Image (cartoon, rainbow, N blue to C red):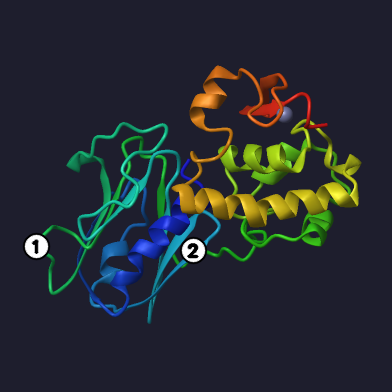
Amino acid sequence: MPEGLEAEIWCRSAQSLIGREIGPVWCDERVAPVGLADELVGAVIRSVRRRGKVLLVGTEGPVLGLHFGMTGRLVVDGRSPIERLQYASGADRKEWDRLRLETVPMMRQGPALRMNDPRRLGRISLDRDLSRLGPDLFTVTASELASAFKRRRIAVKTALLDQHVVAGLGNLCADEVLFWSGVAPTRSVDSLRELELEAISAACRERLQIMLVAGGSTCGELSPNVRAEAGSCPLDGGNLRRASINGRTAVWCERHQQ
Ligand SMILES: [Zn+2]
């Protein structure tokens, strides 16, 4: 958290910045390259895009990249499209700001773009090379999965969290995708059949859109409440299991996920 879904929601809300000239910029240099502000001031915002979990603000010059880490969130023109993140407090304190970017003319409600991140795990980049990121979480195909999994022998859950395999999937969305595809997260990728790869890519295309509309990565069937209880499966009443796979908590149904 935040995952590609949250980045997509922020990306849509930040479209209003396109065409504006960048005014004063302040950033926390513990999480940003030195001199970032000087590079951006006076440039005009030409595009706002998402690549995986990264939000990209393009100008005719440099491209600003916002990586939200575990607790980063975006505020556009004083409004936050996502008020509260799962692992973050609902508070919004000024000392947690990592970026404050004004546009010209300046907005009365404060910076046009603000990244607030209490735990300071997010990063701010300029012109970062993202070409090695995998296909996008909303469009990944079975054959793209097959070629990314080739000659590997790791748990499918771990593979899906690798941003070079699928860009934008995080812990909650990966569990949700496996839940809907009926594949256990512990399965080794070299054991997956073609039909199972099809099911994983179909779940990415269909279920993630449903979660996006519902509000983000916490809005799936395996919501944070369901995960915390790890009681019974909302689909078939099977036993929900919770275990750590490669350091990340996975939740899955022992009945319908094989
Ligand atoms: Zn089940």
Residue 37 in the image, given as x and y percentages of width and height: 27, 64
Question: Residue visible at 69% across and 28% down?
Answer: 252
Work out which residue is located at the far left of the displayed protein and give it.
108
Question: Residue visible at 31% across and 31% down?
Answer: 89
What's under tag 2, amino acid-wise? Arg
Residue 179 in the image, given as x and y percentages of width and height: 69, 37
Residue 125 visible in the current orientation: no
According to the image, label 2 marks what residue? 50
In this picture, is 253 found above or below 137? Answer: above
Residue 91 visible in the current orientation: yes
Residue 247 in the image, given as x and y percentages of width and height: 63, 27
What's under tag 1, amino acid-wise? Arg
Task: In this rendered view, identify the residue nearer to me: 225 or 41.
Answer: 225
Task: In this rendered view, identify the residue nearer to me: 57 or 173.
Answer: 173
**Mark 2 within 8 Å of ligand 1, using the beta carbon:** no
Q: Residues within 10 Å of mark 1 (few under 14, many from 20)?
A: few
- Residue 108: give its label: 1
Q: Classify residue 221 by image quadrant.
A: top right
Q: Residues within 10 Å of mark 2 (few under 14, many from 20)?
A: many
SS class, disc 1: loop
SS class, disc 2: strand
Q: Is residue 23 left or right of residue 245?
A: left
- Residue 7: give its label: none
In this picture, is 175 found above or below 208? Answer: above
Task: In this rendered view, identify the residue nearer to me: 149 or 84.
Answer: 84
Task: In this rendered view, identify the residue nearer to me: 141 or 147.
Answer: 141
Question: Residue visible at 47% across and 48% down?
Answer: 214
Q: Classify residue 35 by image quadrant.
A: bottom left
- Marks 2 and 1, the one that precedes in the sequence: 2
In this picture, is 186 found above or below 94? Answer: above
Kindly report the distance in space between the C-alpha atoms of the residues bearing marks 2 and 1.
27 Å
